[in-house]
Amino acid sequence: MCGIVGYAGKEKTVPTLIDGLKRLEYRGYDSAGIAVISENNLVVKKAAGKVSDLEAMTRNLTGIKSAVGIAHTRWATHGEPNEVNAHPHVDCTGRIGIVHNGIIENYKALKTYLEDRGHRFVSKTDTEVIAHLIEEFMKKEGATFMDAFIETAQAIKGSYAIAAVSLSDPGTIYATHLSSPLVIGQGNGENFIASDASPFLGRASKIIYLPENEIAVVAAAGIKTFDLDKRKKDPVFEKFEGTLESIQKGNFPHFMLKEIYEQPERIEDAFRGRLLLQEGNAFLGGLSPVWDKLLKAKRFVISACGTSWHAALVGKYMFEEIARVPTEVDYASELRYRNPILGPDDVVFVISQSGETADTLATLREAKKRGATVLGIVNVVGSTIAREAGVGVYIHAGPEIGVASTKTFTSQLAVLTLITLAIGRGKGMSKEKGKFIASEINSLPEKARRALGTENLVREIARTFKDSRNFLYLGRGANFPTALEGALKLKEISYIHAEGYPVAEMKHGPIALIDENMPVVFVVPKDGIYEKVLSNMEEVKARKGRIIAIANEDDEYIDSLADFVIRVPRTLGWLGPIVNVIPLQLLAYHIALELGRLIDQPRNLAKSVTVE
């Protein structure tokens, strides 16, 4: 969940590390720190709060002579976010510095072992044991730093990405990982490590996705990798073509708003080269190796977390209505700890923006162990889920920096529509029907642009309801998950309590909450169950609830029931969430803006959940 970055090269190390941390701050922003080796000293600076606080603290170090350093921005797991618990952590001698992303599950036993041997701990973190373990193992006769680092990697249990520097090997960073992401970037006379590739943008031309349980030894002169038996490996370099523009806000005040407005283009990117209008079909090359299994599957299972789980719920409606495949949706955090009934007749889709979500990755591995066919739907190229699934589809949403997911949700849905169409055609859907559906799918980017035109009205609604302490979001069919996603966005960035429900379930409890102070958001497109939703709106109106409706542009009746109507273009019912969610994203954004929240970095949250 935290962000780590390391640098070995010819440039000024401290500014390079600070810049890298700024690009990783979406991964954690409780505290931050750096450790650089300069003139046979390990210089460590840490600060509670944002990377900007650390930057202010280190301004007098910008000219320090150093060719190697590591840095960290933290999302707290063990120990409250303060300067003492911030990374990097050091050993008793002050000669070893380490940063860590993940959780060390056996740290208590290791800490006791080390304390019995005279080690003194200063923090409340699980991470600090790593520095002391390396120190302890360095005491063995003839031990090198690599020996001690490898022995430490073998002793700890849990999920981790670790980077370490030492005065005993002052020009080098040692790194390894297990179930937490780590990427290595190769530049011109300089090399990097980081939790993702954003710190390398503009400076690295090649990257390495380090295999788990391998050791990377990174210096300005080059990169070497080894297994845990110290056997040299041949790292696989891939071309890296990221751009700085993709991680900058441009003219937008927040990344979240920029990413909301990027959605029409990102949906087009998901369709490009895949949607075959004249054939009424879709082609996704990543599915080719398992195409026969997809068509013969007795059941689909979709597993995900958070916003991706909401996309999975919409996927269930798509797969069952159009592809006619029984589909189950499971929280990855629950499925991994059950004894799931999965086997060779099942196809399991795992959905993750980062491709590193710990629970979703564990589900992937469990499903493969049980013989199911597993496919990944991810955004980050080369991520762990993408590599381990082996087959699947990239959503091509581009970097998403705002912690609250927006464009990745609609891009995930865009990919699910293509998979649905392709399977439907493969199972006998007529070409005529396929062409009709493909045409509707093709219209989604333009309809998303029209939905963005509701922002001025949404801003007024936000000003009206910014002081409300509770919201209820209601939808039916594929728009029930849309209601869930709208409620989640509001909770994440405004800190207002909100719940999403199927409309008909309102009478089974939530209706007790409705009074003149309760805003109720209905997602009510003109589809086959439109009249049913109108009846539920009447029930809310009778109890003086204040209604905000997401309705279609041609709906003239809705004004008689709703206090506010946000109109969006009409489309097929199971495609509707891609359009209908956009005003809900804007509503959450503008309420949070009115309340003065930290929109891109909401409290207690981080972008990528790589720990349990």
Image (cartoon, grey):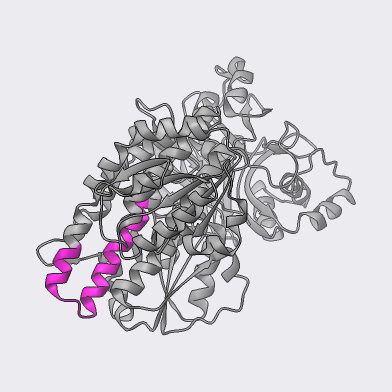
Task: Pick the residue in front: 186 or 450.
Answer: 450
Q: Is residue 125 visible?
A: yes
Rendered position, 502 above or below 129? below
Q: Where is residue 296 in the image (x, y as percent from the top left)?
A: 32, 84
Q: Which residue is drawn at 35% across and 50% down?
A: 580
Q: Does the magenta stretch include residue 411?
A: yes
Q: Exactly how many numbered labels are in the figure?
A: 0
State left or right for residue 163 relative to residue 140: left
Task: Pick the residue in front: 378 or 406.
Answer: 406
Q: Residue at x 85, y 41 (%)?
A: 120
Q: Can residue 224 be seen in this view?
A: no
On the image, which quarter does residue 456 sit in? top left
State left or right for residue 540 relative to residue 129: left
Q: Position of residue 391 (x, y in %)?
A: 36, 67
Give the magenta-colored segment's residue range. Answer: 410-437
Quadrant (top left, top right, bottom left, bottom right) of the C terminus:
bottom right
Rendered position, 541 above or below 55? below
Task: Pick the residue in front: 301 or 38.
Answer: 301
Q: Does the magenta stretch include residue 273?
A: no
Q: Which residue is drawn at 55% across and 37% down?
A: 494
Among all residues in the image, which is located at the extreme top? Answer: 60
Provide the major secondary structure of the magenta segment.
helix
Q: Where is residue 367 in the image (x, y as percent from the top left)?
A: 50, 75
Among all residues in the image, which is located at the extreme front? Answer: 542
Q: Where is residue 447 in the image (x, y as percent from the top left)?
A: 24, 47
